[in-house]
Amino acid sequence: MIQPQHYILFSKKSIKIALEKAGYKDVSVIPAYKVVSYNYLLYKIEKLNPNLFKIGQKLKHIIPRKLRNKLFNVNIGEFMVIARLG
């Protein structure tokens, strides 16, 4: 996870167990992706990991602008849950 944003965190296994105990069926847990650019990722890690940010800043000068602004699908540890109430 790039930046902690939630007070309650679940693993894939724990969210599935919790939902099944709450009466949900056919629980499916799949990766969730964010669409981000290199520049946005660099911005997000600035406060979280200053050393990695410094490396990213140096790389920024050798990566072509077109590539820095290109959008990428990135999984940062989040997931999506789909379930049916039993």
Image: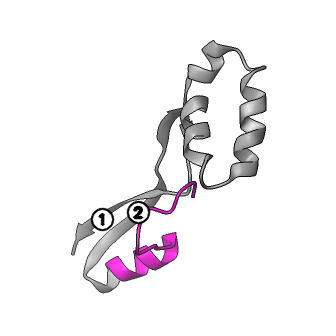
Between discs 2 and 1, the one toward the N terminus: 2
Q: In the rendered image, which residue does mark 1 sit on?
A: 83
Total residue callouts: 2
Residue positioned most to the bottom = 21
Q: Is residue 86 left or right of residue 80?
A: left
Question: Is residue 47 positioned above or below 21 on the image?
Answer: above
**Residue 81 in the image: x percent, y percent?**
37, 61
CB contact under 8 Å: marks 2 and 1: yes
Q: Mark 2 Cα within 10 Å, few/some/many (few <14, many 20+)?
A: few
Residue at position x 55%, y 48% from top?
75
**Residue 65 in the image: x percent, y percent?**
64, 15
Q: Which residues are magenta?
A: 1-19
**Quarter of the figure with the N terminus:** bottom right
**Residue 74 in the image: x percent, y percent?**
56, 41
Q: Quadrant of residue 48?
A: bottom right
Question: Is residue 85 positioned above or below 1 on the image?
Answer: below
Q: Is residue 51 left or right of residue 7?
A: right
**41 falls in the magenta region:** no
Residue closer to the observer: 84 or 30: 30
Q: Amino acid at mark 1?
A: Ala
Q: In the rendered image, which residue does mark 2 sit on?
A: 28
Residue at position x 46%, y 73% from top?
10
Q: Mark 1 Cα within 10 Å, few/some/many (few <14, many 20+)?
A: some
Q: Amino acid at mark 2?
A: Ser
